[in-house]
Amino acid sequence: MTNHLRALALAVFAAATLSACGERTLLTVNATAQTRTAPDLALVTLGVLARGADARAAQQAQSERMAAVVAAARTAGVEQADIQTVGFSLEPQYAYPRNAAPRITGYVSRNVVTLRVRNLEAVSALIDATVAQGANELQGIQFTFDDFEASREAARAEALQTAQRRAETYATAAGKRVVAMRSITEPGSTLMPWDSRRDSYIPPPMAVSLEQSAARNSINPGEIDNIANITVVFELR
């Protein structure tokens, strides 16, 4: 083949390729969906703080009270596998007299556990029972799902349907049609606690002293928002 014919063939091939590419359009659609569901699991984080004249006394007092707290949790229906130690400390306490070196006045022992409570109606009674047995710190109650992934399926499906509807709208406006879904990406999603009574998000819990709040507790699980975000690439022709 001569150089002239070779150049002509390449030109025809390039023109055909450009023509084919011109018929193919890629459309990227971002979609978000939100579903609201009642939680089925509570994570109650509470602890025992005990003081003693020396390290051993503080440790023993804390250990005895925590054993009673765990027993109360078990009696309330919490499985042993659902009780997890998440914090433990033993620290000296100091006095700082004027014109003198600091001196140790005693020790503080702290043991913190997280209880996975599957019966949400039992959360209030559980707190009352553990307080009665020596729990004196409440570091937070978090409502969530036992199966986190399953809780997000409805939001994911709704987000994909939204993306498909948007793609069809864009395709019709452009005089094309959707012929394929090329990719689906889930960059991230969130779970946010929701108070259905106040119709607002619940702020993060703050640690409180249970010795000062041992009256009958009112615990409301509310609902949780599942928010799914996806990016979908469609092919239009």
Image (cartoon, grey):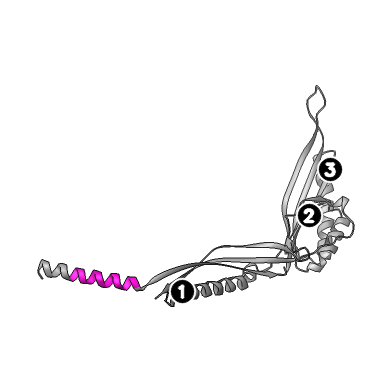
| Position in image of residue 156 (x %, y %) | 58, 71
User: Where does the C terminus fall, quadrant-wise?
Assistant: bottom left
Using the numbered discs, state the Cα–Cα distance from disc 2 to disc 3 in whole angstroms: 17 Å
Amino acid beneath label 1: Ala
Return the residue nearer the eye: 195 or 111: 195
Q: Is residue 130 left or right of residue 14?
A: right
Give the residue type that dot 3 points to: Arg
> Considering only vertical position in the picture, is 212 above or below 129?
above
Picture residue at 85% right of the left edge, 52% below the top? 210
Classify 10 Å Cα crowding around label 1: few (below 14), some (14-19), many (20 and above).
few
Mark 1 lies on a secondary structure that is helix
Residue 11 x %, y %: 20, 68
Instruction: Give the prevailing secondary structure in the magenta stretch.
Output: helix
Q: At numbered mark 2, what does the secondary structure look like: helix, strand or loop? A: strand
Q: Which residue position holds label 1?
A: 173
- The magenta segment is 9-22
**Nearer to us: label 1 or label 2:** 1
The residue located at (62%, 65%) in the rendering is: 227
Q: Amino acid at mark 2?
A: Leu
Q: Earlier in the sequence, mark 1 or mark 2?
A: 2
Specify which label sits upstream in the sequence, 1 or 3: 3
Q: Looking at the image, which is closer to me, 157 or 115?
A: 157
The picture places residue 203, in percent across and down from the top left corner, at 73, 56
- Crowding around mark 3 (Cα neighbors within 10 Å: few <14, some 14 to 19, many 20+) is many
Report the side of 88 relative to 133 (left or right).
left
Q: Disc 3 designates what residue?
A: 51
Assess whether residue 19 is covered by the magenta stretch: yes
Residue at (49% x, 76% y) in the render: 168
Mark 1 or 3, which is nearer the eye? 1
Q: CA distance from mark 1 to mark 3?
A: 73 Å
* Label 2 packing within 10 angstroms: few (<14), some (14-19), many (20+): many
What label does residue 46 carry, if any?
Answer: 2
